[in-house]
Amino acid sequence: MIDILKREDLRAVAERQEGTCVSLYMPAVTPEKAQETKQNPVRYGHLLAGAEEELVKRGMRAPDARDYLAPAYGLLEPDFYWDRQGDGFAAFLSAETFRHWRLPVRFEERVVVSDGRFYIKPLLPVFGGDGRFFVLAVSQDSVRFFQGTHYTVAELDPKGVSPSLHEALKYDDPEKSLQFHTGAPPAGGGKRAAMFHGDAEWIDRHKDELLRYFHILDKGLHELLKEENVPLVFAGVEYLFPIYQEANTYLNLVEKPAATGSPELVSAEEIHREAWPLVRPRFEEGRREAAAKYRETIGTGLASGDPSVVVPAAVEGRVESLFAARGAEAWGAYDGRLHKAHLHERREPGSTDLTDLAAVETLLHGGAVYVVEAGEMPGPPPLAAVFRY
């Protein structure tokens, strides 16, 4: 199970903090490997030990460093939390806040201790324009909600989205309620697999009830996705999709459903296998167009690869698309009063990774960010930006 990381969450950890900031990233063992999930809290404990060591190196007394990290240490206790991880785990601690998420991105293990800002760059694939999407999987007895990337998909907690179709309509007038056909119980007992009866007459007879339910579902999704503009794929029996389209108000619903049949019976990997081909063309086209525009406009004032130019433009909301080379860094400082960024030859006390800052500001202002390998950059690493004006 993974957590929904919203733009408002990104905004909260991107803001300047008071004092020392601790950013923690690690890969995690997912529930599919149940016997190995005990590695998760052990690995997290090692990260915290590394953070303590870094704090002491920066002049904090060892007991004070342990106290400073106390909120993070408190997360070690609930075993059930570590048994239900996504592909990666990220946590951010300062004197003001402690936030943490289970996410569908496999991070490299890393501890970053810095002044005034968290280290955000590894989160960018969760928000970037290069592969993030959602899947809504609907059946009679369950609603499943997934967040996917190019390589992974993980199930989110659908709490707040909607009850199942059965639950949402069970208090209706019995004469008007949906009548579902279910298969025979499996041999040896157990739960029956529920199926929507798919003939045209049945659909016509119950369309009003289905439409009413999908309006309920759409309303729940609106709260989760109100700041999002990434693709949403509908997964379920195909004949339900036109009815869902009629109720849908999310602007980036993919025009074709993922043909999974009744989705409570399929794995997350099967969901990804069906959904990714539907969204891949959108991402590839967007990235190609952004790279071509950079090459066409570099030298005209509408594009730049200079971090000292790109960062102020990103803070102003002028960056339309940004390419960031994976693993590349540009240490420096941004002066918000003078609205200028200064590059440092090497990391210094108080340095900020300007590629990190440019990417976060681009996302917060509605731009697209593509985190790519150095060889896939449209210009020299670490940055390549196209400006709106």
Image: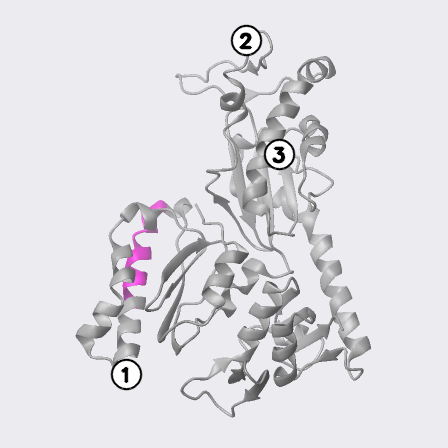
Q: Element at badge 3?
A: loop
Quarter of the rendering containing residue 341: bottom right
**Real-space CA distance between mark 1 and mark 3, rounded to the nearest whole angstrom:** 53 Å
- What amino acid is found at the position of numbered circle 1 in the picture? Lys
- Residue 331 percent coordinates (x, y): 51, 84
Quarter of the rendering containing residue 62: bottom left
Work out whether mark 2 precedes mark 1 in sequence or the reverse, and give the earlier one. 1
Q: Which mark is on residue 260?
A: 3
Q: Is residue 334 above or below residue 293?
A: below
In the image as oriented, which residue stretches furthest toward the bottom? 345
Main secondary structure found in the magenta portion: helix
**Real-space CA distance between mark 2 and mark 3, rounded to the nearest whole angstrom:** 30 Å
Reading the image, the residue beneath label 2 is: 174
- What amino acid is found at the position of numbered circle 2 in the picture? Pro
Residue 261 appears in view: no
Q: Magenta segment range?
A: 34-46
Q: Is residue 16 above or below residue 197?
A: below
Reading the image, the residue beneath label 1 is: 57
